[in-house]
């Protein structure tokens, strides 16, 4: 049931991903409800291919080195909540209208 899922999720997810289970479950649910939507996706900031040529060179360059900085960005994402809300500190768009 839901109780066992919550207990196992808290223990395993918190230890493996270093993220509390409930905030992750909420963001994961919202991500899949709006996956690949330009404005509503809760995990990625998407861009339109036709607009990529107009982006600053720095932004274009980050695409090619994205895997190198991924381990650092993961912790920034968890704690600062960029772009949609924190997983450790509960604030931002992800938490609007939600309760724990």
Image (spheres, rainbow, N blue to C red):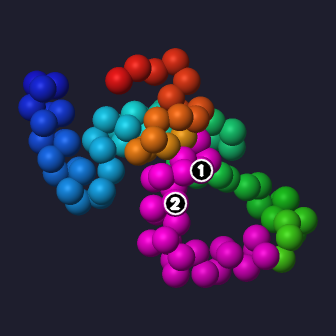
Is residue 77 shown above or below 55? above
Coordinates of residue 40 in the picture (x, y in percent): 63, 36
**In the foreground, 45 or 82:** 82
Residue placed under numbered mark 1 in the picture: 82
Which residues are drawn in magenta?
A: 58-84
Coordinates of residue 99 in the picture (x, y in percent): 40, 20
Residue at figure coordinates x 16%, y 51% from the top left: 12
Q: Which mark is residue 68?
A: none
Is residue 73 shown above or below 89? below
Left/right of residue 85 with respect to residue 60 in the rendered view:
left
The secondary element bearing badge 2 is classed as: helix
Q: Quadrant of residue 56?
A: bottom right
Residue at figure coordinates x 59%, y 50% from the top left: 82
Coordinates of residue 38 in the picture (x, y in percent): 69, 43
Residue placed under numbered mark 2 in the picture: 76
**In the foreground, 96 or 60:** 96
Q: Is any atom of residue 28 visible in this view?
A: no
Is residue 64 shown above or below 78? below
Quadrant holding the C terminus: top left
The secondary element bearing badge 1 is classed as: loop
Q: Quadrant of residue 96?
A: top right
Left/right of residue 54 with respect to residue 64 in the rendered view:
right
Q: Is any atom of residue 63 visible in this view?
A: yes
Q: Report the Cα–Cα distance between label 1 and label 2.
A: 7 Å
- Membership of 90 in magenta stretch: no
Task: Report the residue that reaches farthest toward the front.
Answer: 89
Cβ–Cβ under 8 Å for marks 1 and 2: yes
Coordinates of residue 58 in the picture (x, y in percent): 79, 76
Is residue 92 shown above or below 2? below
């Amino acid at each position: 049931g839901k109780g066992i899922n919550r207990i196992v999720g808290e223990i395993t997810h918190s230890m493996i991903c270093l993220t509390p289970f409930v905030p992750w479950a909420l963001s994961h649910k919202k991500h899949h409800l709006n996956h690949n939507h330009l404005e509503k996706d809760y995990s990625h900031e998407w861009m339109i291919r036709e607009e990529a040529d107009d982006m600053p060179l720095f932004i274009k360059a980050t695409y090619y080195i994205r895997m190198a900085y991924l381990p650092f960005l993961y912790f920034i994402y968890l704690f600062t909540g960029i772009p949609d809300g924190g997983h450790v500190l509960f604030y931002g768009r992800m938490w609007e209208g939600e309760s724990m």
